[in-house]
Image (spheres, helix red, strand yellow):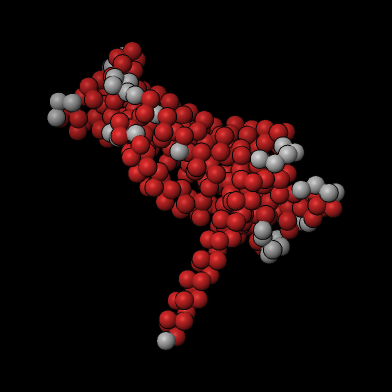
């Protein structure tokens, strides 16, 4: 009986938390369409989230491209399918690896930063000061960060895909002296827009989840200075988990409406 009551209490708490997050997300969506529009703040966040994430995304994409070529080269050569290496790499990254890895990298770097910054503003009462000046702190601080995440993630994903192909070419060239022209021809032979557009656009959902969760933990913290680190940690953990869950759902939806996007 005690276990049943405890389980019911945890379930209630979990459902309440989901409701709070959903309500916060709905407020973000409705606020984003209401004037005044914080274009300057949004542009600043695009630079903060996008430009500063480029080195991490580029290094990760390059390394993943090299590693994947090294792993697949010997196996495909054994089966006489060496010509398929560029195409396997391009399809793998454009369809799944690029979007998911880019989102997880952004969740780790940007999610923690957003959560910590907003939590620090809340702890130092700067958000209250903004409200005193008759400025909507939610629209000024939260909405631009979420919108920036939505706009930036597809661009970062595309950049990761391209750097991964570059890494794959460098590794393949070192192993078999394959020319750049032939690598590109093989990589994009039979490649359709359905292999690129839907998987890349799904990262807008990832960006919304990362931005919303991170802003929620930072904006609503009430634990003072001690809550800054906790908000950063919770932002990364929950946003990464939601990205993985959303990826499973979105892949199924993409395959349903775009059957040609499958490998």
Label count reads 0
**Residue drawn 59% across the image and 51% down it:** 25
Q: In this view, does 72 lie to the left or right of 151?
A: left
Q: Which of 99 and 183 is in front in this view?
A: 99
**Residue drawn 42% across the image and 41% down it:** 100
Q: Residue 77's image quarter?
A: top left
Q: Is 138 placed above or below 3 here?
A: above
**Residue drawn 80% across the image and 47% down it:** 135
Q: In this view, does 116 lie to the left or right of 78?
A: right
Q: Residue 21's image quarter?
A: bottom right
Residue 140's spot in the image, x, y percent? 73, 44
Q: Nearer the viewer, residue 222 or 233?
A: 222
Q: Outermost residue toward the left?
A: 79
Residue 117's spot in the image, x, y percent? 68, 49
Q: Is 25 placed above or below 94 here?
A: below
Quick check: can you spot residue 116?
no
Q: Outermost residue toward the bottom?
A: 1
Residue 79's spot in the image, x, y percent? 14, 30
Residue 103's spot in the image, x, y percent? 48, 41
Q: In which quarter of the image is the C terminus?
A: top left
Q: Is 36 placed above or below 116 here?
A: above
**Residue drawn 56% across the image and 55% down it:** 22
Q: Quadrant of the N terminus?
A: bottom left
Quick check: can you spot residue 12?
yes
Q: Is residue 158 left or right of residue 86?
A: right
Q: Residue 176's image quarter?
A: top left
């Amino acid at each position: 009986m005690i276990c049943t009551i405890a389980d019911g209490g945890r379930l209630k708490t979990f459902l309440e938390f989901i409701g709070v997050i959903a309500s916060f997300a709905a407020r973000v969506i409705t606020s984003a369409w209401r004037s005044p529009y914080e274009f300057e703040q949004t542009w600043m966040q695009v630079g903060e989230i996008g430009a500063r994430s480029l080195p991490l995304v580029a290094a990760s994409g390059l390394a993943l491209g090299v590693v994947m070529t090294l792993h697949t080269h010997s196996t495909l050569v054994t089966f006489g399918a060496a010509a398929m290496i560029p195409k396997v790499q391009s399809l793998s990254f454009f369809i799944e690896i690029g979007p998911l890895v880019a989102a997880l990298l952004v969740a780790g770097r940007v999610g923690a930063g957003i959560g910590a910054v907003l939590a620090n503003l809340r702890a130092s009462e700067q958000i209250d000061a903004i409200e005193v000046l008759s400025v909507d702190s939610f629209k000024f601080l939260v909405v631009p960060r979420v919108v920036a995440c939505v706009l930036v993630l597809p661009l970062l994903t595309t950049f990761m895909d391209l750097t991964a192909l570059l890494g794959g070419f460098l590794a393949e060239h070192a192993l078999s002296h394959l020319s750049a022209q032939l690598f590109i021809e093989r990589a994009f032979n039979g490649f359709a827009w359905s292999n690129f557009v839907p998987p890349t656009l799904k990262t807008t959902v990832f960006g919304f989840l990362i931005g919303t969760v991170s802003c929620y933990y930072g904006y609503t913290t009430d634990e003072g200075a001690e809550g800054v680190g906790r908000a950063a940690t919770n932002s990364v953990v929950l946003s990464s988990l939601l990205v993985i869950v959303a990826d499973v759902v979105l892949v199924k939806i993409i395959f349903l409406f775009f059957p040609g996007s499958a490998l």
